[in-house]
Image: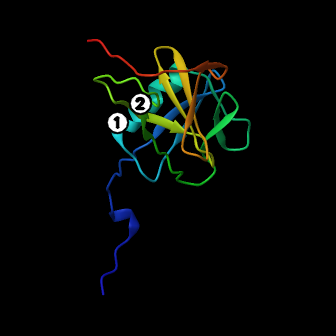
Amino acid sequence: KLYMSLCQINQSVELDYLKLKMNGEEHRVVIPCNFSASTRQYIERTCQHYTFTENGDGILRYDGMPMFDLRPHQPRIDLFEVRLEAGGAVQSMTKYVELKNVFRVLDRQQYVSFIADNALFMDVRPDGHHRLRLNSNVSVEYACIYIND
């Protein structure tokens, strides 16, 4: 048997964390169970630029929609990839657009992507089709998407 005093162990542990700006000015440190440096950088930049709120219930919200449940000791913080395909009969060289670092609304098939000072809301209906809205209130329709360099 080996007995060792805890005072003799001198080892520092580096914690991976997110520093989230909420309610305009407050910062909250979150230690997620699934840390990623790239996810941390993206979420911290997004929280600096867009207004996220937490009303004392432990739920991080954007535009009133629950994005992350921060109540667990080490919450799960996930970002998603979404693929938008044109649904019309128009043919083009661009068949789809894939968005990365997309937030998902808790317990819903609803996604939010932050693009050029705007929020793109994507609602997935039960039939698999989707509805796009810009800044939560402007409907977006498209037949095909063209991207120029």
Say whether residue 131 is left or right of residue 63.
left
Colour pattern: rainbow
**Residue placed at 41% from the left, 30% from the top?**
42
Direction front: furthest residue: 89
Residue 99: x and y in percent read 40, 31
- Describe the element under mark 2 as helix, strand or loop: helix
Which of the pair 103/147 is nearer the observer? 147
Where's residue 48, x and y in %?
51, 22
Q: Residues within 10 Å of mark 1 (few under 14, many from 20)?
A: few
Residue 125: x %, y % from top left: 61, 42
Apparent side of residue 2 relative to residue 71 in the rendered image (left or right): left
Q: Label 2: how many residues lie within 10 Å, few (<14), some (14-19) or many (20+)?
A: few
Residue positioned 29% across, 12% down in the render: 148
The residue that disc 2 covers is: 42
Tell me whether circle 1 and circle 2 mark residues in contact (CB < 8 Å): yes
Where residue 12 appears, as percent x and y from the top left, is 34, 51
Which quarter of the image is occupied by the C terminus? top left
Q: Residue at x 60, y 54 (%)?
A: 72
**Which of the two residues, 117 or 36, is positioned nearer the viewer here?**
117
Relative to 92, does residue 76 appear above or below in the rendering? below
At numbered mark 1, what does the secondary structure look like: helix, strand or loop? Answer: helix
Query: Is residue 148 toward the left or the right of residue 62 in the image?
Result: left
Residue 24: which disc? none
> How many marks on residues?
2
What residue is at 42 percent from the left and 32 percent from the top? 85
Q: Is residue 66 above or below residue 116?
A: below
Pointer 1 residue: 38
Quadrant showing the N terminus? bottom left
Callout 2, which amino acid? Answer: Tyr
Amino acid at the residue labelled 1: Ser
How far apart marks 1 and 2 lie (CA) works out to 6 Å
